[in-house]
Amino acid sequence: MSDFLLELRSEEIPARMQAKAREDLARLFAAELAKAGLTAAATVTYATPRRLALILRDLPDATEAVSEEVKGPRASAPPQALEGFLRKTGLTAEQLTERDGVLYAITQKPGRATADVLAEAIPAVIRAFPWPKSMRWGDASLSTESLRWVRPLQGIVALLGEQVVPVSIAGIDSGAATLGHRFHHPGAITIGSAADYVEKLRACHVIVDQDERAALIRDHATALAADAGLVLVEDEGLVAENAGLTEWPVPLLGRFDADFLSVPPEVIQLTARVNQKYFVCRDGTGKLANAFVCTANIDAHDGGAKIVEGNRKVLAARLSDARFFYDTDLKAPLEEQAKKLDRIVFHEKLGTVADKVERVAKLARWLVEEGAVGTPDLADKAERAARLAKADLVTGMVGEFPELQGLMGGYYAAAQGEDEAVANAIRDHYKPVGQGDDAPTDPVTVAVALADKLDSLQQFFAIGQAPTGSKDPFALRRSALGVIRLITENNLRYRVPTDLLDFFADRLKVQQREAGVRHDLIDAVFALGGEDDLVRLLARVRALQSFVTTDDGANLLAGYKRAANILKKEGVGADATLAAPQEALSYTPEKDEAALIAALDAAEPAAAQAIEREDFEGAMAALASLRAPIDAFFDSVTVNDSDPQKRSTRLILLARVRAAVHKVADFSRIEG
């Protein structure tokens, strides 16, 4: 058994591509080895800016010998069939084996040296590698057949045990030599085997394990901030990105001019993060501090002082630009900025952003005036916020950082003297954006956020642009989830438009799955039809879920399904006549039959009244009273009696059971 090491050294691999590249390298190699019948005991992959590496543990020295059997024609087949089979297999008639009157070609394939398998696999993997973006280079790039790689490939280390696996691709021969850190150890290093790869590179200032680099950056940056009396703002995405930009990460703390703190903290953080890959810090009160942490790729002789100073100057230039945008934007009132929205097309069939703003403003006002959100006295604020909510789209700051839309509008509105509720609504009207985002609760904000999302849903559905399959170019599924959260978390009694009900039902199942609500119970309530109040619907679903997990609920479900199956078999539909006047009967009902009639007479009105007052637990309790009478009825009463009236009456009785249950939910949709 031997370990195999492959290192593909190149010019800089973009940080964003490294994780996927590691996955692809492991996957492609596993597939190539599987073709030869080889499997590694374990696979380890590494990525740095300059190298992609793979270690396969405990590979056998050779593949197993295998016997291949190909079935041929019958021994009595015409000569032409035999000749065709011989041509196909390359054997003679004497080399065939006959078994049960059928001819077989049996060939023995000897095992192959694992090194030979790897020598074929390496070029195949390199040429098939699915980089999102790749390039050709050098004189060979004149041919479209030349090698493509993410950046020019410079070296290949391929070792099985301590032996080089010889391969040559694009003029690059494999070997045992690689390079260390670009500045600390630019000379060649000879790798002995996979066992010493990590430590030899570490000795040459290269940490090949991306997780180790990430932990070092995270821990050292946190410690630097703490030593300065600050708290590092956590950012795992930035940790991973800096780990992908460095082979020998050295976090360094610097300071920028405190005057820049007059710019909104989100702008400073985004400028530092997006443009410079810096972390930011907060002081003891939670406010943004005038400090940053950059990650160098070198141990500087001066402790990093010059690196910090250089980075401070670059950040200062970026922050100066941000402050210019901010100060310039503040000079134009949002009301004036909003007039420019008629220059931005929202959708070719739906007009401009100004047209959308007009629709949203009217809808937000209507939601408040009708009492769906807040109180009518907030209608003016809701409309004002809606008319200004998109104005920051034409500002310089949002043009530079689109991620800040809404947020900057809130800052500008507050600075320009708008009502606090209006400014907050402008800031938060896109919320909730994702699963981890809080849903707004302030009535003015809720009205604008709800109107904005409902307008998008209604308008795009109206022009036939509903999501299909995995395609959702206008993020309508996200809008629907946002509407559901705004309605349910604020307990709004808003009726969803009928043409959107099915779409909302699907989104509701996705959203409620996280809360542990069964999708079949949502289907069971939606199937009743006419339920467009999501708060009421979810209250009914939760009561139903609690009920069906009890013994009474499980047994009632079983009894319902038995009754429904009988009715289906007998062709008794939902429109069957449910009245069976006692005086019209020509027979005296059996004891358990009479008990079920009495139980239904009591349960039906009790359940209906409970539903009317939205006491769904009470409705379930009323249905639970049917459990024992139904069980007893099926145990002792013959439904398909030879007497036609008895049979008809009992079928009608079962139809009453089905109808009573369907007032709460369509139990036929419930699994189990």
Image (cartoon, rainbow, N blue to C red):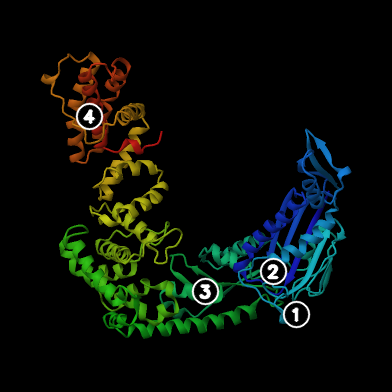
The disc at residue 140 is: 1
- Residue wearing tag 2: 247
Between 492 and 236, the one nearer to me in the picture: 492
Q: Amino acid at mark 2?
A: Glu
Q: From the viewer's perspective, is the residue at label 4 or at label 3 nearer? A: 4
Q: Amino acid at mark 1?
A: Ala
Q: Name, please, the residue furthest toward the left.
A: 583
Q: Secondary structure at mark 1?
A: helix
Q: Is residue 517 visible?
A: no
- Residue wearing tag 4: 656
Q: Secondary structure at mark 4?
A: helix
Between 559 and 257, the one nearer to me in the picture: 559
- The quarter of the displayed image where residue 452 is located: bottom left
Whether label 4 touches label 1, CB < 8 Å: no
**667 above or below 141?**
above
Q: Earlier in the sequence, mark 2 or mark 4?
A: 2
Q: Residue at x 84, y 61 (%)?
A: 165
The disc at residue 408 is: none
Q: Amino acid at mark 4?
A: Arg
Q: Earlier in the sequence, mark 2 or mark 1?
A: 1
**536 above or below 576?**
below
Q: Earlier in the sequence, mark 4 or mark 3?
A: 3
Between 499 and 7, the one nearer to me in the picture: 499
Q: State the CA–CA distance, disc 2 to disc 1.
A: 30 Å
Q: From the viewer's perspective, is the residue at label 2 or at label 4 nearer? A: 4
Give the image location of residue 580, x and y in percent: 16, 25
